[in-house]
Image (cartoon, grey):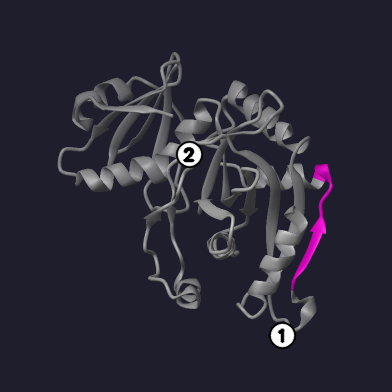
Amino acid sequence: MFEISRMGYWKEIQSILSTLPVIEAWQPTSVRIVTQLRRSGNQYWLSCPDIGAISIDCASNQISTYPIENIDQTEFGSFLTFVWFPFAYQLCGIQVIHASAVVNHTNNTILAFCGDSGAGKSTLAFGLAKRDNWTQIADDRIAFNAANGEPKLIFIPDRIKLRPPTADYFGEEPFGYDPCTWLETPMTIKTIFFINPKKDQAPHSRDQYEIRPLSKADSYKLLLSHAFSITTQLQENNQKLLNNYLGLLSDVNFFQLSIPTDFNLLEDIYNAIEAIVE
């Protein structure tokens, strides 16, 4: 979505940033350093003294980068892609939701799994992608625009990150960080499962997993709870966020998926999911 250009170093734009008020300062859950959001006209700035800064021009889809002088460029690029990108998208009206996703090759429809960290999003998407007709396109986030009523999927870089128990189950290396596959063909979001891990259940019991449809009202609340949102201080951005998530409700089917925390019934769960989305 964005064209990225290296424009200079952090020290060269510190005087500019010092004149702009901080709209929001937040610490993403995945890192331990604080990012600050500023605005100058139609241009947004994200900055962190330990990393550098970027300016975001939504009119031209241009990101200009200003890393600190001694930072490893791979580290800066990773921070830009996996920490700042979701918020840059959201500032420009493209919504990003915390979810893994697979695409079905027979009809190019997307099945997504929303849940908190460790709920099982990666496990479900990775395992389903090992079956016929499925490809994993997201492990942690999907970007979309549903402002016109039809959810349009938009590319955002992502990588597969399997925790050790899941990697061991599938015979893979943990935290391998292989990039997710992206298909150039148009894809439509059709089904979203909200994962609710079950704990302390008797092993091998058939009632360890449960799938039930959700109302539009409940689904909307859950969608917003998993949305990437950088600030509530920008009214126009707030309205775009709310409208885009409302746009998902008309054409997408929503389910709550309660699953055990072990892998004993995983293949049964895959079968049940495929039966629902066929």
Picture quarter with the N terminus: top left
- Left or right for 16, reference 273: left
| Residue appearing at x 62%, y 23% in the figure | 235
Query: Quick one: SS at disc 1?
Result: loop
**Was residue 71 drawn as part of the magenta stretch in this picture?**
no
Magenta region, residue range: 209-217
Q: Are marks 2 and 1 in contact (CB under 8 Å)?
A: no
Q: Is residue 69 above or below residue 121?
A: above
The disc, 2 or 1, on the residue closer to the chain's N-terminal end is 2
Q: Is residue 8 visible?
A: yes
**Was residue 214 drawn as part of the magenta stretch in this picture?**
yes
Amino acid carrying mark 2 in the image: Pro
Name of the residue lying farthest toward the top: 41
Residue 174 location (% of width, % of height): 40, 69
Mark 1 lies on residue: 204
Towards the viewer: 18 or 253: 253
| Residue appearing at x 21%, y 38% in the figure | 68
Q: CA distance from mark 2 to mark 1?
A: 39 Å
Query: Quick one: SS at disc 2?
Result: helix
Q: Is residue 173 above or below residue 117?
A: below
